[in-house]
DNA sequence: CGGAAGATTTCT
DNA sequence: GAAATCTTCCGA
């Protein structure tokens, strides 16, 4: 990396296989510049959703629908959707166009703008600010206007920060996708071991 | 045009 | 363990 230059993750990072990107995303920092204030947190937990072959993915047998349209773009764009009419979920689209893969960000370790997060989340418990997909969207003020946003050119982006060895990363089945048949057993959730900001204790791997 | 389901959170 | 609540998708 060039000294003094931007730490922002560039496009090429995202245009790779979803699992490679997912592993490297652990330890990156998600930053949202809102009204000249930086609100950010380190990614400590995520899941991979891989296109038409993944029964749990929104793009499964759902090719070209309006909601998942952004998943067919080149990597490095945001995919934001509303869940249960109440909360938002933030995904990073990865890989090349027409490869509808996405990394679903599940939890962050709060770093900057913590007082802003506390205000938005109405709690002072930092371990509860971003420990879940809906929570982190609330804390970083991510909403549907960010759907399709370019993470390489905007106020919402990722920065290089830490990297973790394989020993420090645990994989497990994904959460709340029991409807997905065999796909529910794929070990496509990744999180940092012994990190108290991970959303919850995972179900034991089969 | 209407019915159904969901990558969640929070409270009991 | 269940409710809250609305966008999106799919069938008719």
Image (cartoon, coloured by chain):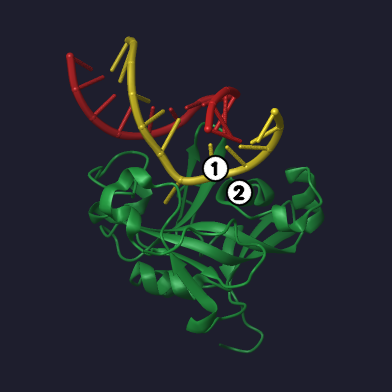
Chain colours: A green, B yellow, C red
Residue A15 against residue A108 in the figure, above or below: below
Q: Quadrant of the N terminus of chain A?
A: bottom right
**Along the viewing direction, whichever of A128 and C8 lies nearer the viewer:** A128
Tell me if residue A73 can be seen: no
| Of the pair A33 and A120, the residue shown nearer to us | A120
Mark 1 — residue? A88
The chain carrying label 2 is: A
Residue A157, picture quadrant: bottom right
Q: Is residue C4 left or right of residue A151?
A: right
Question: Please, what secondary structure does the residue beneath circle 1 have?
Answer: strand
Residue at x 33% of width, y 71% of height: A17
Residue A119 percent location from the top left of the image: 79, 45
The residue marked by circle 1 belongs to what chain? A
The residue located at (65%, 47%) in the rendering is A141
Same subunit under labels 2 and 1? yes
> Where is residue A56 shown, x and y percent of the image?
33, 49
Marks 2,1: beta carbons within 8 A? yes
Q: Quadrant of residue C9?
A: top left
Q: Which mark is residue A128?
A: none
Q: Nearer the viewer, residue A175 or A165?
A: A175
* Residue A137: numbered disc: 2
């Amino acid at each position: 990396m060039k000294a003094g230059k931007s730490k922002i993750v560039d496009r090429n990072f995202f245009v790779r296989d979803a699992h490679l990107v997912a592993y490297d995303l652990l330890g990156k920092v998600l930053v949202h510049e809102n009204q000249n204030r930086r609100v950010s947190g380190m990614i400590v937990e995520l899941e991979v959703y891989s296109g038409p072959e993944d029964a749990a993915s929104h793009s499964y047998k759902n090719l070209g629908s309006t909601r998942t349209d952004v998943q067919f773009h080149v990597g490095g764009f945001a995919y934001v959707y509303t869940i249960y009419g109440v909360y938002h979920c933030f995904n990073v689209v990865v890989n090349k166009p027409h490869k509808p893969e996405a990394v679903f960000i599940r939890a962050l370790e709060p770093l900057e703008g913590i007082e802003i997060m506390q205000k938005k989340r109405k709690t002072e418990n930092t371990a509860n600010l971003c420990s879940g997909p809906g929570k982190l969207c609330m804390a970083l003020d991510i909403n549907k206007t960010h759907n399709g946003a370019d993470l390489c050119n905007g106020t919402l982006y990722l920065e290089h920060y830490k990297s973790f060895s394989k020993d420090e990363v645990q994989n497990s089945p994904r959460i709340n996708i029991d409807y997905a048949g065999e796909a529910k057993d794929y070990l496509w959730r990744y999180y940092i071991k012994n990190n108290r900001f991970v959303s919850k204790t995972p179900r034991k791997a089969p």
